[in-house]
Amino acid sequence: MSSSYTNRLLRVNLSDGSIKIEKINQDWQNKFIGGRGLATKYLVAETDPKIDALSKENKLIFVTGPLTGTPAPTGARYMIVTKSPLTGAVACSNSGGYFGSELKFAGYDMIIFEGAAEKPVYLSIYNDEVALKDASEVWGKGVWETEELLKSAEGDSEAKVAAIGPAGENKVLFSCIVNEKHRAAGRSGVGAVMGSKKLKAVVVRGTKGIGVNNPTQFFEDINRSKEILKDSPVTGKALPAYGTAVLVNVMNEYGGLPAYNFRKAQFENAEKVSGETLADTRLVANKACFACTIACGRVTKLPDEASEQYIVSTSSRNWKNAGEGPEYENTWAMAPLCGVDDIDALIKANWLCNDLGMDPISYGATLACAMELYDTGAIDEKTAGMNLAFGNAEALVKMAYATGYREGFGDYLAEGAYRLSKRFGHPEFFMGVKKQEFPAYDPRSVQGIGLAYATNNRGADHLRGYTIASEIMGIPEKTDPAATEGKAALTKLFQDATGVVDSSGLCVFSTFAIGLPEIVPMINSATGSNYSVDDALKIGERIWNMEHLYNLEAGISGSEDTLPKRILEGKIPEGPTKGMVNRLSEMLPEYYKLRGWDSSATPTEAKLKELDL
Amino acid sequence: MKTLRVDISKCTACRQCELACSWHLTGSFNPAKSAIKAFVFDTIARYVPYTCFQCDEAWCMNSCPVSAISIDAKTKAKVVDKDRCVGCRVCTIACPFGTISFDSATGKVYKCDLCDGDPSCVANCPTGAITYGDVDTSSTSRMSQWALKLTDAYSVKEASL
């Protein structure tokens, strides 16, 4: 029976060099669909949550979903699942581009890396020919050059490369894994795990192709989704025109765009770095990930004079070429949050993050924290090695480089804002949850997203329960961002539904237009499964609880389901949302109740039984 | 007679054309076996869907020793008769554009056959970068774009008079 699953996984032991092909556990596949759910099940079954994330006991899993590699719109995604060195919690970071689909075409749903190599290696996959190869020539090099060199070494310009840069090698705690130079499994430091295993890259080429279970039904299902995506004002118009950075002006006007390390909720120069400004002045093309009919990706080019400013080492030679980004999150973290309004410095810092293999959200947020330390006199120019005043565009660019290589003060930035703020005696300047920095929506003026941040299994993050869709954009229906009522249920629903999307291989951006009633039929006709929407939501809830149990066992208790004091007590000082704080205590108990957890966030026996965990 | 037209400024490199083509040719989603390829030149921000031009004096057809390639009466596409093809690959060497390929899974060559007049790549391109139109007017839209620029130039000249 044909199916879009390949039903095979590659198990690569980096300690002894062994490579095995295994059949995917069918029971687990049924219970978790694929992607994030399935890989987390493997991680939970095979590792102890208490291990050191950077030890050889940790495993690093690359995983696709059943719709990855099919023409289902946005069916590009793969995920990295591992234990995070930044948070100590479960990490699951998602990326697009062409890597995930290529892995499927080579005949694999998943790769599990275990152990650690003694010398730098990369994994080369050409269908059934799989080998670990010497990576000493590319160790130390940026992601972009690594990709070019490995394609050349493999003699195949169409091979797809996922690599770490110097940041991953140097175990920067928010380093990422980057494919096609600009697409990243970004958050929680998954690149450092790869670096700790001395695994520089995975190079994959596949020519096998994949089928679907019921082609007639499948084409009907995907064409319906494509039409809905095309007709939606968000996925059909705003995202193609302005990218995700269309939100800069939207959030700023509302009073929900944190600036100056959350001292403010509006940035006076937001217009200078908005999606509209980027489109008008720096955008040269739209770029899609595999099978994506939205194409929100920004391809940008610097003016000649800007490409010669703030030069850092070798990477800047690429600044004369076109590159990708910045998107909304990167823009926010590195511009408003740091008080920077120089769009060219922002573009360069973003490209540096991509080339160094570093999460621009955590980098920008950590620099903003350092800037507050500087502003309050907790650190000075001598400690930092340069002027770290809010708004310093040169610092934004140069500190990115220093962070990736852990040079000078960059060595402290590389530890993230939680550890940085503690080191210099001001833990209250850390703006995040579970040691991970916040993303770009102010939880003081958007109540639900505060609950989503506080309860997120991977620390502060917007992508596992994007209540902004409802609270700001009115998708699927508008709720009042200032209200706490109903937000517990909203957050739970978004979290559970996202688990399904992340397990399917689709991009979460597709859900601006389509929902589980469209996604579940695509999974069914592609694989031959027979899930209802309710079955799928139950799977999403199972995934959420499985991740949560992992975290509890790792020693992360319910007491960490909270927000910084500045968010709970420090009122927004000015603007349309003046005076607002996050009222977490009005939402959290109800959330736990809806989850079937006791007051210490421990799932009840009945809930575990219901979820078959 | 119709031809495929490509407007590279509209291509986003989503590869829906490759998925559609490979499904048409092989019954699976397999960009490596697609007769159309969307190439990515990232440093210059160019994405280029590329396939057979269906040349009049087709090198592939003329070089085939077993006459496995013929002209489709309806679309004028050069099409491969898989029963006749012996997999010698001479056509892949003869074609100066690289748009006829060998598939080791079947032991035969494959190329764009214009899907019997309803090209699947065109139907599945989300941005209109690939269209199918009359060959004799294929350059009209580009001429029109440049004509518009001339209009601007004339306006400037008139204003200065």
Image (tube, grey):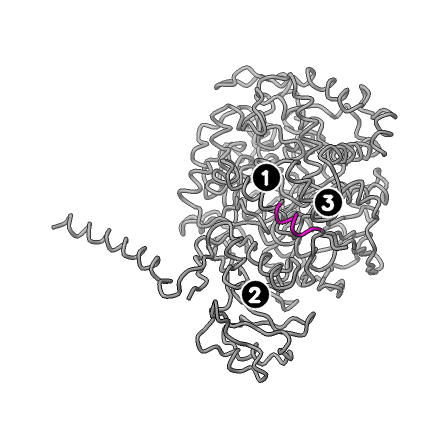
Q: Is disc 3 in the same subunit as disc 1?
A: yes
**Could you tell whether A260 is left or right of A485 in the image?**
left
**Could you tell whether B113 is left or right of B140 in the image?**
right
Q: CA distance from mark 1 to mark 2?
A: 30 Å
The reply to whether residue A494 is in sight is: yes
Residue depicted at x 27% and y 56%: B147
Q: Residue type at mark 1: give it.
A: Phe
- Say which quarter of the image contains residue A107: bottom right
Where disc 2 sits, the SS reads loop
- Image x and y of residue A406, in percent: 65, 46
Residue occupied by mark 2: B35
Numbered tag placed on residue A35 in the rendering? 3
Residue depicted at x 53% and y 61%: B39
- How crowded pointer 2 is (Cα within 10 Å; few <14, some 14-19, many 20+) is rated as many
Residue occupied by mark 1: A509
Q: Residue type at mark 2: give it.
A: Ala
Q: CA distance from mark 3 to mark 1?
A: 16 Å
Q: Is residue A602 magenta?
A: no
Check the image and name the residue furthest to the bottom: B65
Nearer the N terminus, badge 3 or badge 1?
A: 3
The answer to which of A95 and A308 lies nearer the viewer is A95
Name the mark nearer the viewer: 2 or 3: 2
Determine contact: label 2, label 3, CB under 8 Å: no
The answer to which of A170 and A213 lies nearer the viewer is A213
Where disc 1 sits, the SS reads helix
The magenta segment? A214-220
**Could you tell whether A431 is left or right of A41 in the image?**
left
- How crowded pointer 3 is (Cα within 10 Å; few <14, some 14-19, many 20+) is rated as many
